[in-house]
Amino acid sequence: MNILNEKKGIICDMDGVLYHGGKLLEGVKDFVDWLYNENKNFVFLTNSSWNTPKEFQQRLQRMGIDVDEKHFYTAALATASFIKSQNEHASAYVIGEHGLLNALYDSGITISDIEPDYVIVGESESYGYENIIKAVKHVNNGAKLIGTCSDLTAPYEGGLLPACRSLIAPIEYATRKSAYFIGKPNPLMMRTALRMLGVHSNDTAIIGDRMDTDIIAGIETGLDTVLVLSGVTKKEDIDCFPYAPKIIIDGVGDIPKLALLGDN
Ligand SMILES: [Mg+2]
């Protein structure tokens, strides 16, 4: 655990690490206090494209955790940043929520249903047969197909919801084109997070609850990895993967406790 004391930067996943649905997980307040007291550069990273950073900040605030908006980075922001880096004057047909639409708008990308350069898909309540038909038409006419993340499902209190990869699949099948996915584990998103922190990968650790996104993303970006068992991945799942996290803990509440022990 001493390695976390020495790290200057912490990249931390949110769902299953800080909260589950609307419920704050145990020890999160102590963990966030530890981040501030130890002067860590930190970013809360999520594959969700639904909400804006401001809304994530407010969600945590309602749970009693005060963190500045600048510490949040979403797959929506990463998607907008990628599109802008490829084509500053891009236009896009979007199936997504306001988190994604705001991020694209703020990056100067035009939202358009007429010969768009890109079709961008995130999770959305407005997902339906009609917009799949439009998306298929645009991709067949040459638009590039982008997914905000490659998650098949997203957990909620009642079970699992279909996430971006499940939603984009009909468009891939109908067009025989493969989408490019931006969120974790794509190192694109990790490298941007590192730039936000201003810290080298050697000096940074990632904390997450999923082997197939958080831990693999950390390994491929050269970060030390911390798996928490408070979310999706269970202890018995770990051996099913060909890679392993550096540290396994029950939840982020263990970090300040163990750091204290490590100091003595
Ligand atoms: Mg998670």
Image (cartoon, rainbow, N blue to C red):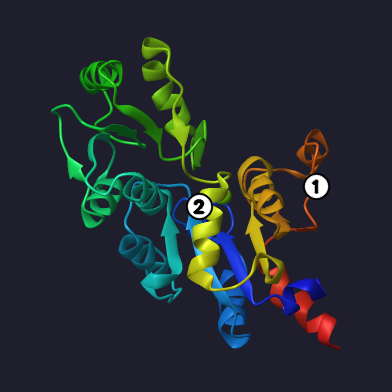
Residue 163 visible in the snapshot: no
Considering depth in this image, is 201 or 52 the residue closer to the camera?
201
Residue type at numbered disc 2: Met
| Left or right position of 113 against 122 | left
| Side of 260 relative to 135 (left or right) | right
Q: State the image coordinates of residue 178 (x, y, percent, origin top left).
A: 46, 22
Picture quarter containing residue 95? top left
- Seen at 68% across and 48% down, the residue is 220
- The residue identified by callout 2 is 189
Quadrant the N terminus occupies: bottom right
- Based on the displayed image, in which of its 4 quarters is residue 18 positioned? bottom right
Residue found 23% across the figure and 57% down from its top: 106
Q: Position of residue 123 (x, y in %)?
A: 36, 37
Q: Residue 199: x percent and y percent?
A: 59, 73
Looking at the image, how many numbered discs can be counted on the residues?
2
Residue designated by label 1: 244
Provide residue 247's location: percent of width, then percent of height. 79, 59
Q: Could you give the CA–CA distance between mark 2 and mark 1, rounded to whole angstroms?
A: 21 Å
User: Neighbour class for label 2 at 10 Å: few (<14), some, many (≥20)?
Assistant: many
**Would you call the spot at circle 1 few (<14 residues within 10 Å), some (14-19), or many (20 or more)?**
some
* Contact (Cβ within 8 Å) of mark 2 with mark 1: no
In the image shown, does 239 or 19 lie closer to the viewer? 239
- Badge 2 marks a residue whose secondary structure is helix
Q: Is residue 119 above or below residue 57?
A: above
At x 79%, y 72%, the residue is 3
Q: Nearer the viewer, mark 2 or mark 1?
A: 2
- Mark 1 residue element: loop
